[in-house]
Image: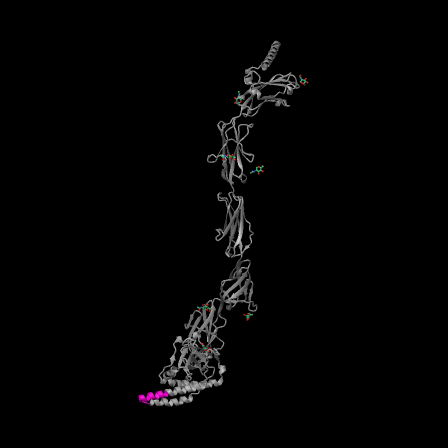
């Protein structure tokens, strides 16, 4: 057993020695089995073939170094360091091309020693072997595979559609925030080249997207969202087959479209004034290509605006010049920056503008109040304004009259609030207010305030006397006229009698009551012994009437004479107007009579043709007429020029005439003698003088004449006597009037007479009344009547159109 173990030991030692011998042999087979370190070199550049000369044993020294190439037995390069340190060793190189370009570099660091080959070429490729001999350590061999690098082709760039970018062409345009895709492609290259994308010296994409075995190498760059930093920059596609080889770089300038990054209306948001052009400036920046600015007001393009633009590569300014109106107040002004090349590349600045405008005013009832309002309530009206700047200085108007503060009357205007305490019907009507600010003053539209009130007698209908003629069973009508708002809903009549208790009122029943709106008519047969008075009561939605309308049954009387008669020129030069105030009607319906008589004309004025006058007096000496009217207002249109007229007025009812008649001043009609006035214009003059009339004696004489004329049977005699009688009457009548009347003639250019002459009863006195009664008796009983009968002229009753009925109450 021991022999066997010993022989194995011997065998192992023999084997180790053999291995060591083999190791020292420079056999080709042996070399091939060693791994070779690959050294890449660029053609034309230097290559460094490493050889580690670190001794295996410390303190040992290198003696010899040999470089062999491929299978060539002769060393390419040798170092003899037997005589000293490696740095002082003697170099020996082969004298061929490779040998001349080779030099062994002994570094301080033994592991870094290397053989440098300058300007390598394709023939230099191959397996190099470095053999290092030491003093004590065993010889060491290193194998180096020198391979030349093959750079790939220049990169080609393709866009997303596969189109190749021309050299130097810019890529894009790409949109900010959107994706970017570019593909870089190289052909060939050994070893397999790297293709990388760079921007601003930092790597964006280092991953090759092509297959390892393909001839082309591709790197596709995808950026999901391009940011502003890429603007104006260049992408680089770099490629290289090896780290030791420089990059082949393809620059790709980028064209990036940018959205506007900022837009601002820079003009301060001040209160704008209407009517004059204002400038508003808007600025935008950050857009590429430069943005267009547009203006909108209230979502609509601004018409009649002037826009001034300025701009640089990325900045755009726009000055809007426009004129605003009050309606624009509160609208949104928008400045919109739009990159025309960038779909959706829009940015806007908006502001609410304030425009000064005059107040807009309206009147409304205070909250919670509605029209119509009831009498007695407190009403608050508000002047509602919308104005910029705020409205101030309010005024209130009622039916176009300024309302003044009146605490006792309960009218309290206070700025924009009008309070009316305890309102009455007189405040019904149109309210308006006005308000003012720096832009002007505005009046509100009218606000109709309807004031409702309980029924009451219409003015003038409170107490009505109904006259009855005793002992006549006539039908009597009581007409109750009510003033109420809203209209009357119910009427109610009561009566009081003389027989029963004077204060007791009894309801009237029956069908003899007829109601029509605000009027109720009660018809009854006169029963004067019993009925003393009637009361009419009305009711509406507001309430019941407080005080009834009274109808007093009284014995009918003749009417009172009309009062306060006036004569004045009628409007539009249409003759003369006589108007009086009606007196008491005596309890019956009254009408009015105006009787007019022409007086004897004055003697002809020298120089003026008077043939017309003479003829008139000859053919129509009386010219008297009566005018009837429901109201004591009359118009006399066709009075003849150069004549004087006497007029009297009285009232009439079923019981008779008013006594005495009212005698009016003399009316004179003048033909205009001014050459400057149009032909036919008439001038009426009213004498101030009270006529003195005394014609009684004349009328006595005339009567005898009249008897004689009636007795006569001869036609000739009748005619003659008639002529004589007429002539006599006329002369006498005229004479009396011209004697007793002072006629004033006035030139139109001289001092004018009073335009209106009031003849009140008081002014005439008692004497006048007596005289006027005399006058009337003579005139109407005899002189005028007689003359008119003589010429068989009937009383002239003017048609209703010839006098003007007036609506006012008399
Ligand atoms: C190596 O060289 C150094 C100095 O040249 C010497 O001191 C040393 O003895 C040498 N070593 C051997 C094993 O010869
Ligand atoms: C040297 O290395 C290159 C690259 O690895 C290889 O292609 C070539 O075959 C090697 N040469 C030898 C002789 O091994
Ligand atoms: C590309 O640009 C370079 C340098 O800017 C210039 O020298 C070259 O002529 C350009 N090539 C083409 C095709 O425009
Ligand atoms: C490029 O990089 C430098 C340093 O990081 C930086 O200051 C510069 O702004 C960058 N340029 C662009 C266009 O991104
Ligand atoms: C105030 O109102 C009362 C009652 O309506 C009226 O009598 C008075 O005249 C008014 N005063 C003024 C100054 O209008
Ligand atoms: C009743 O009188 C009121 C107020 O005067 C008026 O508004 C209304 O129209 C009248 N109604 C009728 C039917 O006359
Ligand atoms: C009537 O008008 C005339 C002229 O138009 C004038 O001369 C005369 O005085 C007026 N009379 C009265 C009473 O106003």
Q: Position of residue 118 (x, y in %)?
A: 57, 23
Q: Position of residue 693 (x, y in %)?
A: 44, 86
Q: Position of residue 13 (x, y in %)?
A: 61, 12
Extreme residue in the top direction: 3
Name the quarter showing ligand 4.
top right
- Establish if 462 lies above or below 56: below
777 or 331: nearer the viewer: 331
Determine which quarter of the picture holds residue 421.
bottom right
**268 magenta-colored:** no
The residue depicted at 36 percent of the width and 89 percent of the height is: 707
Determine which quarter of the picture holds residue 469.
bottom left
633 or 671: nearer the viewer: 671
- In the picture provided, is 352 more to the left or to the right than 697? right
**720 magenta-colored:** yes
Task: Tell me where the magenta segment starts and ends, as one range.
Answer: 712-725
Q: Position of residue 683 (x, y in %)?
A: 43, 78
Q: How many marks?
A: 0
């Amino acid at each position: 057993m021991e022999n066997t173990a010993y022989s194995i030991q011997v065998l192992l030692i023999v084997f180790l020695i053999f291995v060591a011998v083999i190791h020292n042999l420079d056999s080709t087979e042996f070399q091939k089995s060693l791994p070779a370190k690959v050294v890449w070199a660029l053609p034309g550049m230097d290559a460094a073939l490493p050889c580690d000369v670190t001794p295996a044993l410390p303190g040992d020294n290198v003696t010899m170094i040999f470089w062999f190439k491929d299978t060539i037995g002769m060393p390419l390069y040798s170092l003899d360091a037997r005589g000293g340190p490696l740095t002082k060793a003697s170099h020996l190189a082969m004298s061929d091309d490779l040998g001349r370009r080779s030099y062994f570099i002994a570094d301080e660091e033994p592991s870094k020693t290397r053989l440098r080959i300058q300007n390598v070429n394709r023939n230099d490729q191959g397996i190099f072997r470095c053999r290092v001999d030491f003093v004590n350590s065993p010889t060491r061999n290193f194998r180096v595979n020198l391979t030349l690098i093959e750079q790939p082709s220049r990169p080609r760039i393709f866009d997303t559609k596969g189109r190749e970018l021309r050299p130097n062409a810019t890529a894009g345009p790409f949109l900010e925030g959107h994706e970017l895709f570019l593909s870089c492609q190289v052909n060939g290259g050994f070893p397999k080249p790297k293709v990388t994308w760079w921007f601003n010296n930092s790597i964006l994409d280092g991953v090759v997207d092509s297959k390892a075995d393909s001839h082309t190498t591709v790197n596709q760059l995808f950026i999901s969202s391009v940011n502003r930093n890429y603007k104006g920059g260049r992408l680089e596609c770099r490629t290289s087959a090896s780290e030791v080889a420089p990059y082949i770089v393809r620059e790709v300038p980028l064209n990036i479209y940018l959205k506007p990054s900022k837009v601002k209306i820079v003009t301060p948001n001040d209160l704008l004034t209407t009517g004059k052009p204002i400038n508003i400036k808007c600025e935008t920046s950050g857009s590429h290509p430069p943005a267009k600015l547009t203006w909108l007001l209230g979502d609509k393009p601004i018409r009649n605006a002037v826009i001034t633009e300025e701009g640089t590569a990325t900045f755009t300014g726009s000055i809007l010049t426009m004129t605003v109106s009050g309606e624009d107040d509160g609208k949104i002004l928008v400045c919109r920056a739009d990159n025309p090349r960038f779909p959706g590349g829009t940015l806007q600045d908006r502001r609410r503008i304030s425009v000064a405008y005059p107040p807009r005013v309206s009147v409304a009832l205070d909250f919670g109040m509605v029209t119509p309002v009831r009498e007695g309530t407190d009403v608050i009206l508000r002047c509602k304004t919308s104005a910029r700047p705020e409205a101030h200085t309010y005024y209130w108007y009622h039916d176009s009259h300024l309302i003044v503060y009146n605490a006792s009357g309960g009218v309290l205007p206070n700025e924009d609030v009008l309070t009316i305490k305890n309102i009455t019907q007189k405040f019904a009507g149109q309210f308006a207010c006005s308000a003012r600010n720096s832009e002007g003053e505005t009046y509100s539209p009218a606000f109709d305030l309807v004031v409702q009130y309980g029924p009451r007698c219409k003015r003038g209908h409170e107490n009505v006397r109904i006259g009855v003629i005793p002992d006549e069973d006539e039908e009597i009508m009581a007409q109750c006229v009510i003033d109420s708002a809203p209209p009357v809903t119910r009427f109610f009549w009561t009566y009081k009698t003389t027989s029963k208790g004077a204060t007791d009122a009894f309801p009237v029943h029956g069908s003899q009551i007829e109601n029509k709106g605000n009027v109720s008519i009660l018809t009854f047969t006169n029963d004067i012994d019993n009925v003393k008075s009637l009361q009419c009561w009305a009711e509406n939605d507001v309430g019941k009437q407080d005080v009834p309308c009274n109808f007093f049954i009284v014995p009918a009387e003749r009417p009172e004479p009309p009062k306060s008669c006036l004569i004045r020129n009628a409007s539009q030069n249409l003759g003369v107007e006589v108007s009086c105030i009606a007196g008491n009607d005596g309890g019956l319906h009254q009408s009015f009579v105006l009787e007019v008589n022409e007086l004897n004309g004055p003697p002809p004025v020298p120089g003026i043709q008077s043939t017309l006058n003479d003829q008139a007096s000859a053919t129509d000496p009386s010219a008297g007429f009566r005018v009837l009217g429901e109201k004591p207002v009359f118009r006399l249109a066709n009075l003849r020029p150069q004549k004087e007229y006497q007029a009297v007025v009285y009232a009439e009812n079923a019981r008779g005439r008013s006594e005495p008649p009212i005698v009016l001043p003399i009316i004179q009609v003048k033909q205009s003698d001014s050459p400057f006035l149009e032909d036919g214009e008439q001038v009426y003059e009213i004498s101030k003088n009270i006529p003195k009339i005394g014609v009684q004696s004349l009328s006595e004489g005339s009567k005898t004449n009249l008897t004689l004329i009636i007795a006569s049977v001869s036609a000739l005699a009748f005619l003659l006597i008639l002529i004589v009688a007429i002539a006599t009457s006329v002369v006498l009548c005229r004479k009396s009037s011209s004697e007793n009347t002072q006629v004033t003639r006035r030139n139109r250019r001289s001092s004018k007479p009073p335009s209106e002459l009031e003849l009140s009863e008081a002014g005439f006195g008692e004497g006048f009344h007596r005289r006027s009664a005399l006058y009337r008796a003579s005139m109407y009983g005899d002189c005028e009547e007689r003359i008119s009968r003589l010429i068989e002229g009937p009383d002239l009753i003017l048609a209703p159109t010839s006098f003007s009925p007036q609506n006012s109450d008399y």
